[in-house]
Amino acid sequence: MRRNVLVVDVNAIGMVAVIRSLGRAGYNIHAIASQRDALGLYSRFTHHTDCNPPLDSASYLPWLREYIRSHGIEAIIQSEGFLHAIDSAYEEFAPLLPDSVPASVWQRCLSKVATQQWLMDASPASSRNMPAGGIMKDAESIPGKVDLAGLDGPFFVKADAGLARNAPAAQVIRCETVAQLSAAARGLLPGYEALVWQNFAPGKKVGVSLWRHNGKFMAQNMTLGIHMQPWTGGMMSLRESFWHEALLADARNKLEVLEWQGVAMMEYKWDPVNDQFWFIEINARYWGYLHLDLYAGKDFPKLQVDAFFGNLSEDMEPPAKKFACRHTVPGEIGYVMSRIRASDIPVWPKVCSIGGFFFRFLNLRTKSDLWYPGDRLLYWRSWLNYLRKLVTH
């Protein structure tokens, strides 16, 4: 019998990868999203689609209950927004969530503020390999020049949607100086219960993909960011396979300390010059870089859902094959455009960025998130959506 699995928020590229993994494994995929143009609704691995009410509307939970009942849903692949939406009825839906955790745990792990505070308080080991930072709850806790003596900018001020009083959403503000950090914090604090600040960590972005089940790590992989979108920092628009035992061990330790079960992507910065690394944050959900894991044979969604239905297996070894993978549109286009617009980049490196973009179409080692075997129409749909927006704006 084909099991009915509901995948939510399929507008996200990571959830498209979940659909492909589980659909390829033979699960009966129900894909839902708030937007009719969400890419996952058009995947060939999707069997049933629907548009749900907005996650923050009063009609969402009744709609979800009816969908689960009428379609015989046996498992739900959650997103961050979904967890916040079902907060008031979490215990009702938890039995359908693979590797569900107590509400206090997911609320902690979805909060940058709570995550940082928990790791700093837990033990000296768990607070290692973190950039200088702290928690700000009022004007007195905002660091000044004396507190940050010896630290160079930039700094980042981060606010959680879950700690918002009257602010619209999560925010991250880059501050080049201590004065800018102070101004940003004072501007945000009235809208949030607390904020976190972090000093800049140099090097390349690294994503550590982990699956922890019943207290044991069952699957792991690593991703190294090559291009960011924009190029100064952001989403990994181009990344490649990577392995670093010490960094991997640190990520596993921090995930254990945070008491998280299930899948997560632990975000780091790694300096290849001196081999130092710093933990930035946890993404306690399926991540945007999941397609590279799938290409490398690290099938996290299938492993997790198989275990939920009683078929447990693990995959802890480095991948047998290494690949590069890019989010071609709009990710890599955004990377190239940010390089072209940058006033501090000479002309020749800009030309090389343009040439590299086109060369990678011919490089068989470089895969594309959406150019996925058996489901390539999504690639063309993403181009069509991008061009349509370009013309209308």
Image (tube, rainbow, N blue to C red):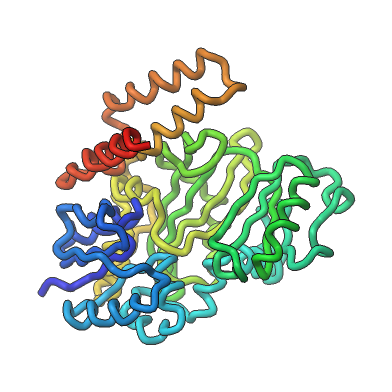
152 lies above or below 124: above
125 lies above or below 382: below
Horizontal relation, residue 17 to residue 124: left or right = left
Is residue 326 among what the camera can see?
Answer: no
Residue 341: x and y, percent? 52, 25
Residue at the far left: name it.
Answer: 1
Residue 367: x and y, percent? 30, 37
Residue at the far front: name it.
Answer: 392
Residue 29: x and y, percent? 19, 65
Q: Nearer the viewer, residue 174 or 202?
A: 174
Which residue corresponds to the image point at 46% horizontal and 72% vertical from the top-left? 84
Residue at the far bottom: name it.
Answer: 92
Is residue 13 among what the camera can see?
Answer: yes
Horizontal relation, residue 122 to residue 333: left or right = right
Horizontal relation, residue 247 to residue 208: left or right = right
Q: Nearer the viewer, residue 167 or 222?
A: 167
Q: Quadrant of residue 256?
A: bottom right
Horizontal relation, residue 118 to residue 298: left or right = right
Q: Quadrant of residue 249?
A: bottom right
Residue 129: x and y, percent? 66, 53
51 lies above or below 329: below
Q: Quadrant of residue 98?
A: bottom left
* Quadrant position of the C terminus in the picture: top left
Which residue corresponds to the image point at 57% horizontal and 66% vertical from the top-left? 111
Which residue corresponds to the image point at 71% horizontal and 52% vertical from the top-left? 184
Residue at the far right: name it.
Answer: 146
